[in-house]
Amino acid sequence: MIIAGEASGDIHGARLVSAMKGRNNDLHFCGIGGDALRDAGVEIIHNASTLAVVGITEVFSKVFSLIKGMAGAKRLLKSLKPGLLILIDFPDFNLKVAATAKKLGIPVLYYISPQVWAWRQGRVKKIKKLVNHLAVILPFEEEFFKKHGIPVSYVGHPLLDGGLSPVKLNEKKDAPLIGLLPGSRDSEIARHLPVMLEAASLIVKKMNRVKIAVSLAPTVEREYVEKIIEKYCAYDYDIISGGADQILKTCSFVVAASGTVTLEAAIAGIPMVIIYKVSPVSYRLGKAMIKVPNICLVNLIAGREIVPELIQERATPDNIAGEVLKILGDSDKIESMRKELIGIRNLLGGSGASERVADIAISMLTDV
């Protein structure tokens, strides 16, 4: 059984399922996920798109879907008693399912661990109690969990399995394309896309030769994004569907919501500005619990700020446009940031994360 509650986890989970089937084609998979896991052959009992949410107060908007999904997952565990439960990120939901698996004696492999090193470190004790093995994807996570006595393996980052490589930026001196990546959930897009579009309008006024495109995540309806663009923008911006990797192939610069996509942009060597907004209550509560100086994964891995972060009240159209114009107007700054971003790629290990996790999973099945 496998549970991936978000778009990125769905993709990483699908690659893991394919790798496991490559080792044993008789394996049967079921669980919670999206189109990628379904296409990989997983029997989906609950679609992940109804569960994904970010923010402490925002969870209330999906409370009934979360309860229904949780109940379905627990029923499946009890009725099927699978040989292994694989959890991918999505900690508040997945750790509750892990508790049921623990009571039933079902081994648990947690792939892409909760970011307890950043906030809510009290969950470490729960992970130690409920999880048989952790497969972590960031280089500093292995040491953190080992200190707490949790069985853990650093497997490298699964983004490197996706074939992303540094792009050649605007060699033909065409008008630069700025990509707007507002997120993969409706709630994220509602918060981020309007300020991004307003910032883009300011940038277009200052730069005559610039194009703007909006990334459409597979989990989001095109019509939803089109309505926001019509409301907040007087320009005819392109919408590029198919996930972040599609827009990253053509961009010279991105304004992105903090998340996995920032690492995708780093791997592609694309300069960026990061923003993020949640509800005021979620922000105040989260700020009190966060234990790290940055929220952007790129800056966390680098150990310092190499891309600007505009969080909450700082994520205004004027601030975003100002940062973008400052960077685009300095060729040395662009080249320096690009080199540092490609350096992040080297810190993430080589490709093959899915294969390494598959080996761990198969060994846990063998041990049952």
Image (spheres, rainbow, N blue to C red):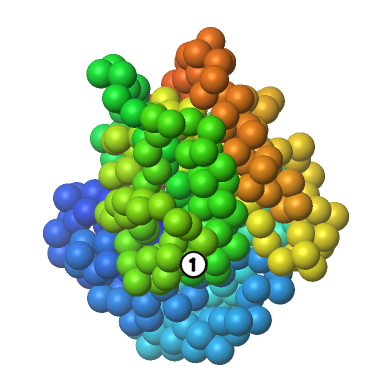
* 148 sits to left or right of 157: right
Along the line of sight, which residue is nearer the eye, 74 or 283?
A: 283
Q: Position of residue 293 (x, y in %)?
A: 76, 37
Residue on which the image places disc 1? 231
Q: What residue is drawn where x is 63% and y is 47%?
A: 317
Along the line of sight, which residue is nearer the eye, 256 or 212?
A: 212
Along the line of sight, which residue is nearer the eye, 151 or 57?
A: 57
Q: Is residue 135 visible?
A: no
Q: What residue is drawn where x is 22% and y is 54%?
A: 18
Q: Answer with the quarter of the image where residue 346 lies.
A: top left
Q: Position of residue 146 (x, y in %)?
A: 64, 39
Q: Amino acid at mark 1?
A: Lys
Q: How many marks?
A: 1
* 212 sits to left or right of 327: left
With respect to residue 118, does 278 lie above or below? Answer: below
Q: Is residue 214 visible?
A: yes
Q: Answer with the quarter of the image where residue 245 lies.
A: top left
Q: What residue is drawn where x is 38% and y is 80%?
A: 46
* 4 sits to left or right of 174: right
Along the line of sight, which residue is nearer the eye, 334 or 350?
A: 334
With respect to residue 353, does 109 lie above or below? Answer: below
Q: Position of residue 322 (x, y in %)?
A: 64, 34
